[in-house]
């Protein structure tokens, strides 16, 4: 715990790091085209969230579709509209993508009523991604709050599937209550992997909950972080990643090594409609994944 | 400079418009409808108003970036979806009698739609559009083009320019596209003497002199961005009603919405004008709204015009037509707002808490 409460040193920012080279475009370069896709499976996760496995109908287009962890697609439900949804599946999975979707509005409401076999459209992938390649050889903190596990899950897969490339790996996840836990059927699998520290915490436990209780930052208490050897990905609501990231920077971690995904309403995904603007920054093009230093320097970002 | 220019009489000018129509162009020009000056496609050259008093209520941007346009249509048949692309661009279009400020506004739209991923619908329409601007014979009370780097006889964004002079209309060719608009030049057209440039300067001085607004300075962008959190914005935005008329009449505002219009059998995905001053513009389905107060939204619009820049020497996204000033139901004036914000930030420091 030697680095705990060491004051944050801004000079560390300078030694880190060229701006990351974000490979925004996938091999499928036609982001203005909507691909016909089919819902293969609908998996109920909680009362509010479902996991949709979606396959592009045209086989060759489906094969060319690739993405990187943290990127998102635009999902169109004919007759209802189009929404940005981050991809939750593994980048190595071909054939279909998994989209974890909360029932919140008109389009997601329609999706939640949709049955297996229904046709939808997807465009993308869009946006920046988590720099998994750069993180190789480092300790990795993967931290999610609530629905934040949806955009993080793809990175979890990327780390797990290439476990030998990383040093210590911690996966921390917190929600309000146990019935909001997403992908609870996978914790067992992830937790059993040698040398992966998986911890789940809830704020308001029910009678059956035996795990830790409190806010996600509480889990950080038990973890020793080598600030110079660690990368963190933090996904969740702004209030959550703000607390987590400022806590990590108190421990001496450079802000450039913390990555977060910003949520914005997006309609075009091509830097045209201005809906996702933060100042002159288009979240759909220059985000949604930003390093925390950049986010702190964007006004109105949080 | 040796440039192609002619001096036309009114009947020659109308004849030219006639020939443009006959050549199959859609000629969009200011006409009067129910006492309101509007851009409309002409059916006859007689309707075009060559010496308008005042500017059109709306900018001509809707002829490149329609208020609402289908991106594609689809039909549903059982589980099958059939997708149909929108029709290919229409016949060539001439935007006639566009004010200098509005022509500059079109360039601001180009920045959005033609940089990065090219918008195919916009690009096709832009490609087939020629802009014939009309220099201003007089400034309107709301005009402030000179305050934001423009000029009543500015050439920015025009392919051809008409300058109303006492001797007649001076027609100048500015681009190759403009030149291509002529088939054969009418032999009766009178070449303008080189000395006419003096007359144009005189007109510019006279009209610019009617605009009594102090300039918005380039270096203010930095000040405004630094003072983003300044408490002055609460006060300055207090009267904003969020009606967004400013964004709708603005020649350079380009925010849009992607909306579905559909029933159980068919539908279309449309792109429609939208505005960052609307409360639901950034509202997520989850309930989170990054710009939840009207102060934040008004500030966003003003700063997007004057402060947020990728490059330091980028021109303002405001061209000074003044429509937002004239039509704001709350009487907000974007130049006054910017001036007051800069003054407050300079006086109280950028960090004065909100």
Image: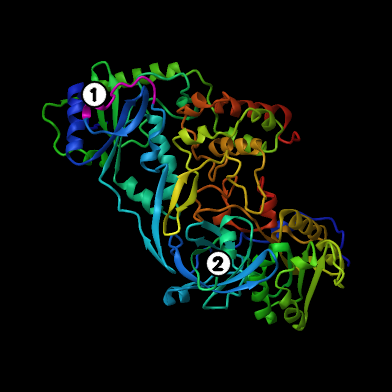
Locate residue A258, reporting x and y percent. 71, 61
Q: What residue do we see at 74% from left, 58% from top? A: A12
Locate residue A257, reporting x and y percent. 70, 63
Q: What residue do we see at 17% from left, 28% from top? A: B15
Residue labelled with disc 1: B194
Q: In which quarter of the image is the N terminus of chain A?
A: bottom right
| In this view, B105 is above or below A126 | above
Q: How much space separates mark 1 and mark 2, taking CA atoms? A: 72 Å
Q: What residue do we see at 70% from left, 68% from top? A: A46
| In this view, B62 is above or below A70 | above
Residue A21 appearing in the image: no
Q: Give SS at disc 2.
A: loop
Q: What residue do we see at 22% from left, 26% from top? A: B46
Which class describes the residues within 10 Å of circle 2: few (<14), some (14-19), or many (20+)? some
Please report the bounds of the magenta region as a residue range: B45-55
| In this view, B177 is above or below B164 | below
- Residue A114 is marked as 2
Which class describes the residues within 10 Å of circle 1: few (<14), some (14-19), or many (20+)? few
Between disc 1 and disc 2, the foreground one is 2
B49 in magenta = yes
Q: Nearer the viewer, residue B81 or B242?
A: B81
């Amino acid at each position: 715990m030697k680095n705990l409460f060491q004051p944050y040193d801004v000079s560390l920012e300078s030694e880190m790091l060229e701006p990351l080279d974000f490979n925004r475009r996938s091999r499928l370069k036609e982001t203005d085209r909507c691909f016909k896709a089919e819902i293969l499976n609908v998996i109920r996760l909680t009362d509010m969230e479902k996991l949709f496995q979606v396959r592009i109908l045209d086989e060759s287009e489906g094969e060319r579709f690739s993405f990187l962890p943290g990127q998102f697609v635009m999902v169109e439900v004919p007759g209802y509209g189009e929404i940005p949804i981050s991809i939750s599946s593994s980048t190595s999975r071909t054939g279909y993508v998994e989209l974890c979707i909360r029932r919140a509005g008109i389009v997601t409401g329609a999706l939640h009523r949709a049955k297996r076999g229904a046709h939808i459209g997807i465009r993308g992938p869009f946006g920046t991604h988590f720099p998994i390649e750069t993180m190789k050889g480092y300790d990795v903190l993967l931290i999610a709050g609530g629905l934040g596990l949806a955009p993080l899950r793809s990175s979890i897969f990327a780390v797990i599937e290439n476990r030998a490339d990383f040093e210590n790996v911690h996966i921390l996840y917190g929600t309000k209550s146990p019935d909001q836990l997403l992908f609870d059927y996978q914790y067992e699998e992830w937790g059993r992997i040698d040398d992966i520290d998986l911890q789940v915490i809830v704020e308001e436990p029910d009678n059956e909950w035996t795990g830790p209780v409190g806010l996600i930052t509480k889990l950080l208490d038990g973890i020793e972080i080598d600030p110079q050897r660690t990368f963190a990905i933090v996904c969740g609501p702004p209030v959550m990643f703000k607390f987590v990231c400022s806590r990590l920077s108190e421990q001496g971690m450079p802000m450039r090594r913390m990555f977060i995904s910003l949520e914005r309403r997006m309609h075009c995904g091509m830097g045209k409609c201005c809906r996702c603007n933060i100042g002159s920054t288009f979240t759909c093009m220059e985000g949604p994944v930003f390093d925390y230093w950049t986010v702190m320097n964007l006004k109105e970002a949080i | 400079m040796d440039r192609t220019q002619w001096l036309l009489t009114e009947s020659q000018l109308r004849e030219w418009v006639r020939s443009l129509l006959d050549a199959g162009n859609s000629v969009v020009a200011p006409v009067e409808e129910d006492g309101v000056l509007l851009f409309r496609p002409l059916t006859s050259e007689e309707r075009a108003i060559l010496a308008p008093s005042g500017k059109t209520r709306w900018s001509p941007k809707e002829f490149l970036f329609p208020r609402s346009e289908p991106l594609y249509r689809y039909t549903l048949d059982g589980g099958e979806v059939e997708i149909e692309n929108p029709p290919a661009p229409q016949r060539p279009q001439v935007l006639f009698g566009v004010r200098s400020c509005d022509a500059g506004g079109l360039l601001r739209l180009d920045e959005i739609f033609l940089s990065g991923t090219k918008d195919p619908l916009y690009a096709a329409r832009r490609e087939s559009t020629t802009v014939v601007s009309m220099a201003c014979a007089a400034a309107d009370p709301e005009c402030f083009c000179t305050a934001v780097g423009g000029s009543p006889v500015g050439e920015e964004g025009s392919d051809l320019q008409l300058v109303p002079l006492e001797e007649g209309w001076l027609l100048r060719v500015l681009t190759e596209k403009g030149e291509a608009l002529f088939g054969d030049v009418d032999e009766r057209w009178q070449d303008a003497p080189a000395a006419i440039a003096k007359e144009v300067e005189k007109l510019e001085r006279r009209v610019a002199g009617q605009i009594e607004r102090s300039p918005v300075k380039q270096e203010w962008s930095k000040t405004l961005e630094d003072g983003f959190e300044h408490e002055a914005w609460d006060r300055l935005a207090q009267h904003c009603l969020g009606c967004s008329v400013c964004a709708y009449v603005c020649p350079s505002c380009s925010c849009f919405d992607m909306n579905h219009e559909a029933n159980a059998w068919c539908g279309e995905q449309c792109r429609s004008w939208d505005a960052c001053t609307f409360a639901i513009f950034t509202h997520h389905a989850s309930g989170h709204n990054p710009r939840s107060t009207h102060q934040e939204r008004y500030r966003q619009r003003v700063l997007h015009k004057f402060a947020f820049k990728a490059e330091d020497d980028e021109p303002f996204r405001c061209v000074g037509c003044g429509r937002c000033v004239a039509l704001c139901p709350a009487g907000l004036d974007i130049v006054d707002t910017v001036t007051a914000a800069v003054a407050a930030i300079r006086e109280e420091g950028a960090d004065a808490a909100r």
